[in-house]
Amino acid sequence: MSAAAATIRPVGRTSRIPLPALAAASLVLVTGALALVFFVAPNDANQGFSQRIFYFHVSIAITAYACFAGAAWKAFLHLWKREPRADLESYVCVHQGLIFGTLVLLTGSIWAKISWGHWWLWSEDQLVLFLVLFLFYCAYFMLRFSLEPGPQRANLSAVYALFGIVLVPVSFAAIRLAKNLIHPVVFTLHGPNFGGWILVTYCVAQVAMLVLAYTLYRLELGGKRLDQRVRDLKEVLV
Amino acid sequence: MSYLRDVGALARKDLLLELRARDTLPAMLLFVAAIFVVFHFTLPAKPSRLETSGLLWVAILFTALLGLGRAFVPEREQRTMDGLVLAPCDRSAIWLAKSLATLAFLAAAEVVALPLYALFFHRVSGATVLAVVLADLGICAVGTFLGAMAVVTRARDLLLPLLFLPLAIPIVVGAVGASVGPPVVASPGKYLAFLGLYDLLFGVICWASFEYVVSE
C-alpha cells in the first residue's frame, strides 16, 4: 500500500488565498468596474458612449499579455529548475491567455465596427498582433495535443511558450513597421494619455480582469490537478 | 573549434545525403517555378512591383516550408536521431548543421527563383537580394528548430506550417518592406535592420534551447 501511495502525485501547493475568496473578489471587482464604466466614467468627446468598450478591451488585452508572460515564466521554470508543477501551470496560463486573447479580438472588432464602420481593420496594431498571437497559441495547443503526456511534451510545450513571449515584441515592432496610423495610441512612453475618472475606471477594470483571470487560472489548475490525481489513483488501483 | 568541426561534419552528412538521393532540392526548384506560373494567372495584367514583391515572398516562404518539412525526415525514417543525440558533441550543433544544410537548399532554390522572378515580373533590386539573405537566415534557423519539434509529434508534416507561419510573419514584414522599394518605402535600411535583429534574437534562442527539444 505504501508503494502504491508513493506513486500518487501530491495535489500540489495550495495557494494562500482560498479560491472562494478569489471568486468573491472577482465578482465584486467586475461589478464595481461595470458600475464605474456605465455610470461614472464620462462620455468620450469624439466617440461618445461606445468608447466605454475601451475599459474592457484594453484591460482584457493587458490581462492576456500577463497570462502569456506567466506561461513563459512557468515554462522557463520548467526548463531551468525542472519544477514538476510548472508544465501544467504554463499550459493553464496559455489556455487562459487564449480565452482573453479571443475576447480582445471580439471587443476590438466591435469597437472597430462602431468607430470606423468595419469589423476588421488591418491598420489596428493591437488587433493584428492578437490575431498573430491567436494563431501562434492555437498552434501551441496543436503541438501539445499531438504529443503523448510526458517529459518530451512538457519540454516542447515549454520551449514553444518561451518563443511566444519573444514573438510579442517582435511582432509588435513588425506590425508597427507595416502600419498606417488609425488606432488611437492611449499609452505612450510618457504614460497614459488620460486622467481623472477615466483613469480610475480603467484601473478598476484592469484589476478586475487580472483578478478574474487569476481566479479562472486557479479554478482550471485545481480541476486539472484533481483530474491527474484521479487518473493516478485509477492506475494504482488497476 | 571542435564545435565547428562537428557542425561541418553534420552539415556535410546532410548535403551528401541530398546529393545522392536528390529528394528535396529538385522538388523545391519545381515548386517555386510552378508557383510563379500560378501567380501569373492569379494576378491582374501588368501587376505592380508592390503586388509581385509580396508574392515573391509567399513563394519563398512556401518553398522554404517544403525544404524544412523534409529536414528531419532522414533522421525519422532511419531512426538516427538517437544516435545524433548520443554523439559526443553539443546538441545545438545538430540544429546549426541542419539549419546550414536547409539554408544551402533554400539558397540554391533562390538562385533559380530570383532570375525567374526577374524574367516573369520585375527587376530584382540589391535590397531584395540582401533581404533574401537575411530572411533565409531567420527562416532556416526558426524553421529547422520547429521542424525538429514537429517531427516527433503525431501530426508531423501537418504541424510544421502551423507552428512556423505565425513566427514567420515578422520576417515577411521585414522582407516585403525591404524589397518593395520607392515610392512605398523610401529606404529599406530600417527593414533590413529589423530582419537582422530577428535573425540574431531567434538564432540565439534556438541555439540555447535546442537541447530541450531533443532530450527529455
Image (cartoon, rainbow, N blue to C red):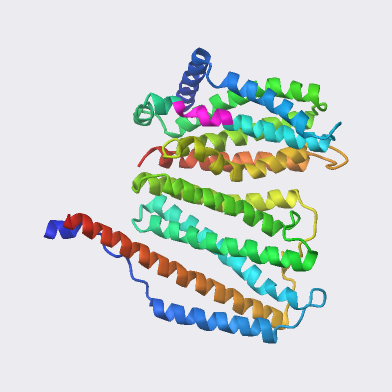
Q: Quadrant of residue A121?
A: bottom right
In the rendered view, tell whether residue A51 sits above or below residue A159.
below
Q: A84 and A230: which one is in front?
A: A230
In the rendered view, tell whether residue A28 sits above or below residue A232.
below
Residue stretch in magenta: B66-73
In x, y percent, where is residue A223? 36, 66
At 80% from the left and 21% from the top, the residue drawn is: B119
On the question of residue A185 being in view, the answer is: no
As drawn, which residue projects farthest toward the top?
Answer: B20
Q: Quadrant of residue B109?
A: top right
In the rendered view, tell whether residue B75 sits above or below residue B142.
above
At 77% from the left and 30% from the top, the residue drawn is: B41
**Does residue A86 show up magenta in the picture?**
no
In x, y percent, where is residue A45? 82, 78
Q: Quadrant of residue B111?
A: top right
The secondary structure that most of the magenta stretch takes on is helix
